[in-house]
Image (cartoon, grey):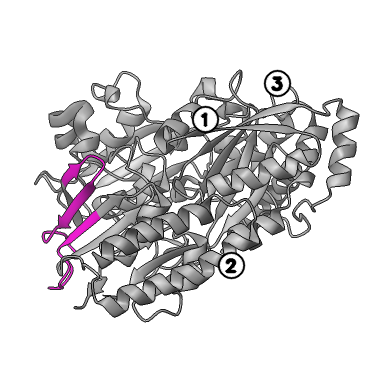
Amino acid sequence: MVVRFIRQLTRSLVRTNAARTGSSICRRFASFACPALILILAACGERAGTPADAIVVGQVAEPRSLDPHVATATNDFRILAHVYEGLVRFEPGTLDLGPSLAREWSVDESGRRYTFELRDDVVFHDGSAFDAEAVRFNFERMLDGDHPFGDTGPFPMAFLFSMVEGIETPDTHTVVFELDEPYAPFLSNLAYPTGYIVSPTQVRAEGSRFGRKPSGTGPWRFREWARQRWVLLERFDAHREAVAETSVKRLLFRPLPDENSRLTELLAGNIDLLVEAPPDLVGYLRAHEAFAVAETEGSHLWFLILNTREPPFDDVRMRRAVNYAVDKEAITRDLLQETASVAHGVISRAFEWASHPDVHPYPHDPEKARQLIEEAGHSGATLRLYATESGSGMLEPLPMAGAIQADLARVGLDVRIEVFEWNTFLARVNAGLEGRAEMAQMAWITHDPDTLPSLALSSAALPEAGGFNSGYFENERLDELLAAARRTTDFDERGRLYREIDRLVHEEAPFLFVAAWRQNAVYSRDLRDMRLEPSFLLNLTGVEKER
């Protein structure tokens, strides 16, 4: 009864807190209530507890697919990173690249020919062999429209490898990729989940159902997907780097889209790890004896896509105006509780070598915003904003939408918010905003400075071409810079080109730049050796659980 009462009270309090749009009264009330609830739970000793041999993870949404060539969200990638591996990987704790399914690789002088020597001690979870032909199958499935299993897609991120002109398999454990031109991000793209290798045998057996019955080579294999309840993985003891006998034999990923439910389940002891923890909760639990907080810097950007194909955002003055109008400092300070910093532009500061040091966030200047709006002739304009209830990397999307709505109202713009469930939201936004909305929330977590501008701002990535440029931004100079940065093999020159890209995108303002998240997760102190990765890919292999 006590736990039931506390759960009901928690829902009520957090709902009040989540509904705020800057109310200091709500924030003070919530900051008193939440620690009190945690102490009550601890005193009552009624935390339910999770199975001793399992780590239970609270996720922000149900995965769209467990096929890495279909998935696009970090929420899904956290699961996929346990089931699959790529030819290369991000080394633990860094964004540096190291060997994985390939023992080693080389690049010829032209920068177009990559040769990978594969491991010979790898098997897929279904028992089939990993070899060069399996690698060829994976990439041809994504890239060849006539492939016999090309209809198991869609493959929305396949253009990460669109530069692949041919694949050779001179022997069982050698693969050679021939690119149509030098492409500097190729290796980091291979480490990204889209580059993970799936079992051809399982694809042939399951066809379009593969995304619900996957098979990879990773240290954890798929066991069950109970829709809207969990995805269950079990330890794959045949893995070449099988974890020594530890207590953890299962990973359970639970979709909990509602922030109140995530909080309730954590407090009740029904999950061990909460990813993308609500900002208010992080401060409350950081020093609590039952919980710990993991944090790390990463390359994240939360922004609004602006529909540049139609008025009013076909006018750069309006795009700059909304950037001046929104008080990003207040959002990161009050709503996000300083778990994020104000975003300056399109290339994360995590890529220090590629981010322009002299490009700074748009300051909060409502008077400047009003002036630009009046010059553009759009005073009193009505704007539709697509928002989501929750989602991977989306921070506090509804309170943030409310804060942006209020700030734009202060400069004479009427914002109408339309809210969608995460996967529905993605489908609508990725289809393009033309004729639908003027603005849409979005968050990207990137693995290379090329990723976001190439996939969301280049003219080659328009929705009609299958890309993510949902705001239809087109700029010839940007396209030229992106092409040059991809072709160069000179690291310093590549950095110079991306810094120019950073400056150009800031000036053209195709996005309303808002926040850069410092990744965090709250977890039970029963877990040992828990840490987060700068890539935002979760790695629970080797995490121990003590009871």
Q: Amino acid at mark 2?
A: Arg
Position of residue 87 in the picture relative to residue 207 (left or right): right
The answer to whether residue 271 shows anywhere in this view is no
- The secondary element bearing badge 2 is classed as helix
Ranked by sequence position, the earlier of labels 1 and 2 is 2
| Residue under numbered circle 3 | 310
Type of residue at label 1? Val
Residue 503's label in the rendered image is none
Determine crowd level at label 2: few under 14, some 14-19, many 20+ residues with C-alpha closer than 10 A: few
Task: Locate residue 399, reporting x and y percent.
Answer: 57, 48
Element at badge 3?
loop
On screen, residue 150 versus residue 26, left or right, reads left
Snapshot quadrant of residue 509:
top right
Specify start and end residues of the magenta stretch as a single range: 224-252
Q: Residue at x 22, y 74 (%)?
A: 545
Give the quadrant of the N terminus.
bottom left
Give the quadrant of the C terminus.
Answer: bottom left
- Residue 334 placement (x, y as % from top left): 63, 61
Q: CA distance from mark 3 to mark 2?
A: 42 Å
Q: Is residue 78 visible?
A: yes
The numbered disc on residue 429 is 1
Residue marked by disc 2:
28
Q: What amino acid is found at the position of numbered circle 3 in the picture?
A: Glu
Say above or below: 291 vs 188.
below
**Left or right of 423 on screen, residue 339:** right
